[in-house]
Image: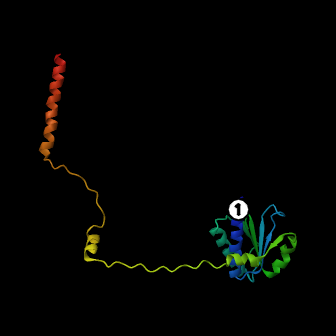
Amino acid sequence: MATVSDAQTSSILRALVAALEDKKAEQLKVMNVGGLSDITDFLVLATGNSEPHLRALRIEAEKIFDAAKLPIAGTEQGGYGSGWTVMDAYQIMVHFFTAEQRVNYALDKLWKDAVEIDLKTMAAKVAAPAKPKVAKAPKAKAPKTAAKAKTVKSSPKPRATVKKSTAPKSAAKKPAAKAKPAAAKAVKKSTQK
């Protein structure tokens, strides 16, 4: 089971509520069932007005969970036309219903001992105005000079330099040739002793 901190869960719940409200979810309710359930800590109940609306709400919830990197344990639908979809994201379980199925399943009554979370307070935290951005003065661009443009064109990539010997090839071979006779003389002297 994936676990996230209480602060992360609160943040995810606020983002989820705001997203579902933007998608016109009806009868939105968040309940803390942490002390009552071994399966989840929070239930989110939302009503949609049609099957396509339920699908749009589910997709929006998936986006929130994905952005928060909260894994989804599973998604169950009663089939097209069932009017019910549930998403299990471990600490948060979301149920989407049509109006008829919301009454039929009556989860609001089943979890009557759960603590309902005030959505106005939760939404207010999400909708808190952001700090105003300070406008930056545009940077003045230096005019391009002909010399600057010329250097850019003439040297697209720096090349590695390789030092070449300035001595002629024959001079390079001579010290090696002298080394052979000297070594041969040293060998002769050592064998003579």
User: x and y percent of residue 152 in the render?
Assistant: 29, 71
What's the residue at 44%, 80% (across, down)?
138
Count of numbered marks: 1
Choose top left, top right, bottom left or bottom right for residue 171.
top left
Q: Residue furthest top?
A: 193
10 Å crowding of disc 1: few (<14), some (14-19), many (20+): few
What is the secondary structure assignment of the residue under circle 1? loop
Q: Amino acid at mark 1?
A: Ser
For residue 162, side relative to residue 52 (left or right): left
User: x and y percent of residue 79 in the render?
Assistant: 75, 74
Closer to the camera, 64 or 167? Answer: 167
Q: How is the image coloured?
A: rainbow
What's the residue at 16%, 22% (across, down)?
188
Closer to the camera, 123 or 79? Answer: 123
User: x and y percent of residue 61 in the render?
Assistant: 68, 73
What's the residue at 85%, 77% (across, down)?
104
In the rendered image, is residue 181 in sight? yes
For residue 26, side relative to residue 135 (left or right): right
Q: Determine whether 158 is above or below 138 in the image.
A: above
**Residue under circle 1?**
5
Pick the quarter of the image with the C terminus.
Answer: top left
For residue 184, side relative to residue 151 (left or right): left
Pick the quarter of the image with the N terminus.
Answer: bottom right
User: x and y percent of residue 71 in the render?
Assistant: 67, 64
Choose top left, top right, bottom left or bottom right for residue 140.
bottom left
Choose top left, top right, bottom left or bottom right for residue 41.
bottom right
In the rendered image, is residue 55 in sight? no
